[in-house]
Image: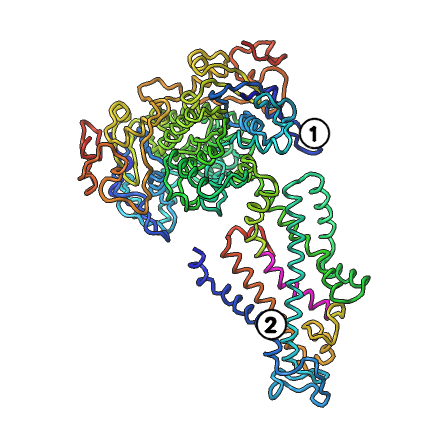
Amino acid sequence: MESVLKIKDLSVNFNSKDGIVKAANNLNLTIYSGEILGLIGETGSGKTVLGQAIIKILPQTARVTGEIWYGNRNILALGEEEMNKIRGKEIALIFQNPSSSLNPSLKIGEQIAETVQKHQGLNKKEAWEKAEAILSQVGMPPRFAHYYPHQYSGGMRQRAMVAICLACQPLFYIADEPTRGLDVTVQNQIAGLLNSIIKNGKGQRSMLLITHDISVAAALTDSMAIMYAGEIVEYGPTREVFKNPLHPYSKGLLNSHPAKGLKPIKGFSPSLINLPEGCKFFSRCSRAEKDCQKEVPMFGRKGGKHIVRCFYA
Amino acid sequence: MLEAVNLSKSFYYGLFQRNKNDAVKNVSFKIKKGETLCLLGESGCGKTTAGMMIAGLIKPTSGMVLYRKENIFKYRPKELKKFRTRLQIIFQDPDTVLNPRWIIEKSLSEPLRIHGLANGKESRDRIMELIETVGLSHEHLNRYPFELSGGQLQRIILARALLLKPDFIVADEPTSSLDVSVQAQILTIFKELQKKFQLSCLFITHDLHVARCIADRIAVMYKGTMLEEGNAEDIFSNPVHPYTRGLLDSLIIPDPEAVHPLDSNIPITSDRNYTGCKYKELCDYREQICEEKEPVLKK
Amino acid sequence: MSKKIFPKNRLLIFGLFLLTLLIMVSLLASYVAPFDPNYVEVENRLNRPGGKNILGTDGYGRDIFSRIVFGARFSLSLAVLVVLINLCIGVFIGTASGFFGGAVDELTMRLVDILLAFPNIIFALLVIGILGPSIPNLVFALVALGWTNYARITRGLVLSLKEQDFIISIKAIGGGDFYIITRHVIPSIIPFLVVLATLNMGHMIMSIAALSFLGLGVQIPTPEWGSMLSEGKQFIFTHPHVIISPGLAIIIAVFAFNLLGDGLRDVLDPRTKEIIKT
């Protein structure tokens, strides 16, 4: 398989008045074409920061080191002008909160048509027709193009968001918590929609799905990376990770799910300002030994593509 | 223990208050001592409004709430204040429930001050005991709410709710804003405490996974009406109402091996008031009678 | 936290400094002023600034500097008095109507709407015109309309506050309305009110001076900035110093309060900006 995006030694720090916030540390990740990669983590694990780093929309205070290779271009070395050509056109971002990313004073159809016009050079009428066609692609009847965002429900707004992203036919999608805060049935619909977009892409489209919801990850992703306290602790094909989670945190996370036993992990996630030396999960881990506290474990390969950052896994 | 009888709440809006919206319509249920009833439904189905009425914070348009056989909306002020010690409510978003300008300790001891039960050491001991029960320590007491995480705040709120030794808790989506692992912690503590203090509970949630592991009985709500009520086991193994069935079918389970019923079609419903069954627009079993009459709950 | 922010806010510090100076001067007026402000010395009338009388003398030969120093007392304390009364009435009415709503709310807010339709100074003119010029009537005239703004803003703040979970949760614990208002609602809106009152101070100083200038406020020969302007207006072309000094005093005082208000607004809560627009 061909790789679409290669992240190498990516670190993101923020300066705050209380100290340096280490939001992401030495991340390495490859996304292959045609796949949905799940980036699983909880609040404060740095997963959103990774998504923002890829399309360079981090706040000004962020300091980013490392490389992000998109094809043969290093995104981190690109200027703002070149980046604007990539954003939306080649890499699309589907936000968690669609109501704040849609313009409340424009009809949905106009918002899609505007993007189409800008990127594909069509005239107004053609763009509107295209917008209606895109809306039906995301499962909405064309008459919905005449509605304003406030006339949409939460799930429909998320669809509209996806429709705007689809307008330029990008090949790489970043979806940041696309199902958070939606009802069960609507979650199911949005998950289905995202799935069909990637699977109908003839192996050309791929997606980084950032989520905290392991059910959605189980249903959609081909492979997954689990993040904890700014580090990736485990990576592998989704089926293998679920069947045989290796990192103690991954095990804990999976077992926390109400449908998998509701067994909580003790303790709290560390603050990203005062990260401990060594393994970040040390204080909450039942398998930890002395040396875990001294150095950060390197990734160990556990058959095939399944890798884990733990001495004792 | 607690009984809701034909609870209804309508909101009026628009020019001259001409438009009427039935947020809750004819909802009835009973909760026994030590039992958890889960009010399950999607956003906007009226479950929160129902919870607020049970807690006596919103007056129903019609119907009543009986606590130990007494109508709570007929209480005199003194009785109402007493009732407020017996029933506690836990809100969805822990970040907003504590006064942001107060340290945790001040917020925690507030119920005792309000009811004139705070006398120095005794109240402090009770707070310390509870704060340890919910897995925190005294060092959290001197912090401000913004310095704690959502999970920690929800523990504080749990501790505060239990301070007055209530026997009934209304929990309105207490974990929906939390991460999975934190949710597991809070729900586990909640279940333990419920057992320890023999608490009855109205647990409001949209999450079927959560409902399944916390509920004794489940009531399914849709557009303000109750569609189905029964033992949690029965509802999950043998759902009767088409809506409940659809809900269970659309549930995504955390297992990549399972067949996921992903369905990207969009159901379109109208928000207007109409006659007949609330679910008829999406129902596969729709017949003429569904258009004409609103079905009533039957055994 | 606020300690760190304060030194950065130079305007706030400067406003605070000016204000402290003004307050000190007005409190210690009898020590600061070199002469009796009301001592008439006709042979020394209309002296130019400099020499024995730092800012010169006025048409009756009274020392202008001493009169300004004593005038600060009147102008400031009157403004403070009016603002405090406005604040108390406004907060009381605003909280009551915001918190309890219903018919009381409807009634008071319609009253506020009607009162707000009058231009401030013209309404005050009307009141004093009917009641006759005196200091109590001046205060009454400024309070009659002044409280409405506080009531309106307080009501808005209380309305948004009362829907917040932490207020509802205290209700659910059993806290009564009085308890919630005094312990939670009012403390939460105090920062906004402090800013509003400070910014309003400048406005009040101007209004009082304006009314005194028209002869409807503090009466001559009492030293007050507005009445000093009024007395001096006949010399505006021949001896402008008589009018420039009290004019500057008004400007400086207003400036000081506005600086302080703006500074406080930024320090206390950035959100305040959207609510209080002056």
Task: Please indicate whether residue A300 sits to the left or right of residue B24 in the image.
Answer: left
Circle 1 residue: B18
Residue C163 placed where, x, y %?
57, 39
Residue A88 placed where, x, y %?
40, 39
Residue A103 visible in the current orientation: no
Give the answer, above or below, for where A178 lies relative to B31: below
- Assess disc 1: are there few (<14), some (14-19) or many (≥20) residues with their C-alpha within 10 Å of its C-alpha: few
Secondary structure mostly seen in the magenta stretch? helix
Chain part drawn in magenta: C195-212
Q: Do callouts 2 and 1 point to residues on the same chain?
A: no
Residue C105 placed where, x, y %?
69, 42
Q: In the image, is residue A126 part of the stretch drawn in magenta?
A: no
Give the answer, above or below, for where B213 lies relative to A42: above
Q: Quadrant of the C terminus of chain B?
A: top right
Tell me the number on the disc at residue B116. Answer: none
Residue at the image point whose x is 37% and y is 24% from the top: A258
Chain identifier of the residue bearing label 2 in the image: C
Task: Please indicate whether residue B160 sits to the left or right of residue A174 in the image.
Answer: right
Residue B52 placed where, x, y %?
56, 29
Residue at the far right in the pictured view: C130
**How many numbered discs?**
2
Chain identifier of the residue bearing label 1 in the image: B
- Mark 1 secondary-structure assignment: loop
Most foreground residue, C229 or B8? B8
Circle 2 residue: C27
Most foreground residue, B281 or B234? B234
Check disc 2 and give the amino acid type.
Leu
